[in-house]
Amino acid sequence: MEKKKLDLNSIIGFTLIFGIMMWIMYQNQPTQAEIDAEKAKKEQVENAKKAETATTPAVAAVATDSAQLAKMKTTLGNFAYSATLPSAKEGFTTLENEVLTLKIANKGGYIAGVTLKNFKRFSKDSGKLVELIKDNNSSLNIQLQTQDNRILSTKDMFFEPTLSKVGNDQVLSMKLKAGANEFLEYRYVLKPNDYMLDFDVQSQGLSKTLNSSKPLDLEWDLKSYRNEKSISYENRYADIRYEYEDGKVNNVGAGKDSEETPEKVSYIAFKQHFFSSILVTDKPFATSKLHSSNLVSDEKIDTVFTKQFKANVPLAFSNGEINYKMNWYFGPTDYTTLKKYEKNLDKIIPLGWGIFGWINKYIFSPLFNFLTSYISYGIAIIIFTVIIKLAMSPITYKSFLSQAKMKVLRPEITELNEKFSKDPMKKQQETMKLYNKAGVNPMAGCIPALIQIPFMYASFQFFPSAFELRQKSFLWADDLSSFDQIFKLPFRIPLYGDHVSLFPILAAIAIFFYMRMTTGDQQMAAPQQDGMPDMGKIMKMMIYISPIMMLIFFNSYGSGLSLYNFISNLITIGIMFVIKNYIVDSNKIHAQIQENKLKEPKKPGKFQQKLQQAMEQAEAQKAQQKKK
C-alpha cells in the first residue's frame, strides 16, 4: 500500500514539473519580429560564406590572366590582350542566307568555309555541293608591324566575334583586341539571297600600337578545288582577273608560274571555270602582287586542285588608322549575275576582245538567254544555231555566187595563163582586165568569208563561258558544259584523251562533207598562179586535216560547243545545196558575164587599182635590174 502511494506521488510530481517547463517555454518563445530578425541574420551569414567561396577562384583567375598576359606580351605586345579573352580558342561563326553558307574562324578572323547551296560538284551521284573554301585551302592574313618593332600575323591570333542583325542583314564583327577599346576589326555583312557580302577592315585606337609609317600587307591566297568533270578543261579557264587604272581589266597568265604587279587595283578575282572568289575595294590598292601557279601537271594524278592563287596588296593608313570598305563575292561566274552588281565584274568572263566581245555581249548572249527562258538548253542551242546561220545566209549566198562566176571565167583565165606564160606581168594585167570587163570582183568570195570569221571565233568564246549550260543534259550528253563521253578507253591517247565523245565525231563528219562540197568549186574558180603554192593540193589536204583537228581538240571540250559546230556545218551544207541546185544558174551567170563584156568596162575598184599599180612597179623594178 505504501509503495503504490509512492508511485502515484512520483507520477504527479513529474507531471507538474513537465507542465511548469512547458509553461516557461511558452512564456519565453520569440516574437514574430525576433524570428524574422534571426532569419535575416542567418541569411546574411550564408551570403557572406558564398561570397567568400566565390571570391577565391575569381582572384585566382585574375592572377592567372595577369601572369599569362605578362608572358604573352613578350611575343604579342599589346595584342596579347586578345589571347586572354574567352574567344581565344578554336571556333567558328556561321553566316547563312538562301545561296551561301559561310564559316568565319575565331583564329585569324577570316572566312574558313564557303558553300554554294544551289550548285553541285561534277559528280551528281555524290550530291556534294560546291565548296569554294574548306579544309584550310584559303587564308587571309595582315602583317602587323608594331611600334616596338614586332611583326605579327593576324592569321595566328584570335578575334572576338559578335553576331547581330540589322534588319534582314546578318552582321558579324571580328575584333583583334589590343585593349578594351583598341582593336583591328573585320566586319562582315551578309544580305538575304546575295552572293556579295560587305567586308570592312578598320582599326580603332591603334595609332600608338601599330607603326603607321608604311602600309599594312594584306595577303590572300586560295588553292582552288576542282568542281567539273574534266579537270584539264576546267583548268584552262581558271586564272586571276583584275581591274586596274580606272576600268581596265586584265588577267595573270595561266601557266606554271605567272605573276603580275598592276597598280591602282579595284578588284581581284580568283576565277575558276564556273565559280569565282572576288575581293572588291572602293579605295583602289596602290600596288599589288598577283601570282598564279598551275597545279595540274598530270590529270590522272592531279585530280583535286586546279590552281594556286595568291594576292598581296597594301592597306594604307589614314590619320594613324586603317579604314577600308570592301566586298567579297563568292558565286557563279555568270555574266548576268555579275553584271547586276555594276562593278565591272562581268569583264572577268572571257567573251573576247573587240568585235568578238561585242558579238557575244549584244547578239549571242541576249538571243541565247531569250531562247533558254522558254525551251530546254539543247533545243535552244539548235534553234540559236539555225537563227545565226539563216542570218548569215545572204553572205553565204554572195560567197558562193562569186565562186560560181569565177568558175565560169576559168576557161578564159586558163587561156590567158597559157598565152602569157612567159610574161607574168602581162598575164596579171590581162586577167585584171577580164575581171573588170566581166564585172567580177575576185575578192568578192573572200570578203563574205572574212565577215563570218568573227562570228565563228565569238562562238568559241561564248559556249565555254556559258554558265547556263553547266550540268544541263541533252540526248546522251549529261552536261553540255563538259564532254559527252559515250565510251571510256582503257588507255590514254596523246592529245585526244581516254574517252570518246560523240558530238565532236558528228561535227567532224559534217565539216568533212562541207569542205568536200566547197573545195571542188574553189579549185575550179581559182586557177593555179605561177610562183604561188598549189592551192588545190592544200585544199585537198585540208579536207582531211580539219576533221581530224576537230576530233582531237573538241573531244574534251564542252559538248554544247561541239553541238553548235555540228548543227552549224549541217545547216551550211543544206544552204549551199539549195543555192547550188536551185538558186544559182551557171548558164545565166555565163550569159550575164558575156553581156557585161559588151558594155563599157567599169572603173576598177580601189583594190584593183592598187594591185595593178603594185604589179607595174614590180615589173619596172625587174626591168631596171635586167638593164644593170
Image (cartoon, rainbow, N blue to C red):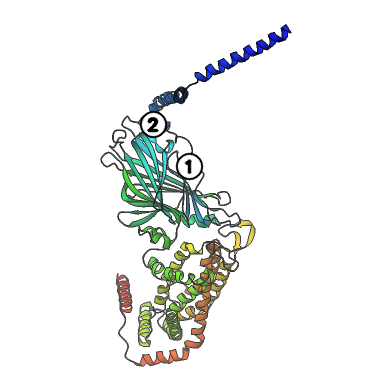
The residue where tag 2 is placed is 81
| Image position, residue 196 (x, y; %) | 41, 54
The residue where tag 1 is placed is 92
| Image position, residue 282 (x, y; %) | 32, 51
Q: Residue at x 45, y 65 (%)?
A: 462
Q: Find residue 409 and report its image quarter.
A: bottom left
**Residue in front for this viewpoint, 363 or 175:** 175
**Distance Cα–Cα, label 2 vs label 1:** 20 Å
Q: In this image, 486 relative to 620: left or right?
A: right
Q: Residue furthest left?
A: 319
Vertical comparison of 74 with 538: above or below: above
Dot 1 crowding, Cα within 10 Å, few <14, some 14–19, many 20+: some
| Image position, residue 393 (x, y; %) | 45, 79
User: In the structure shown, which secondary structural element does the residue marked by tag 2 occupy?
Assistant: helix
Q: In this image, 317 relative to 172: left or right?
A: left
**Residue in front for this viewpoint, 472 or 64:** 64
Give the number of marks. Answer: 2
Q: Find residue 217 and report its image quarter.
A: top left
* Three-letter amino acid code at the position of disc 2: Tyr
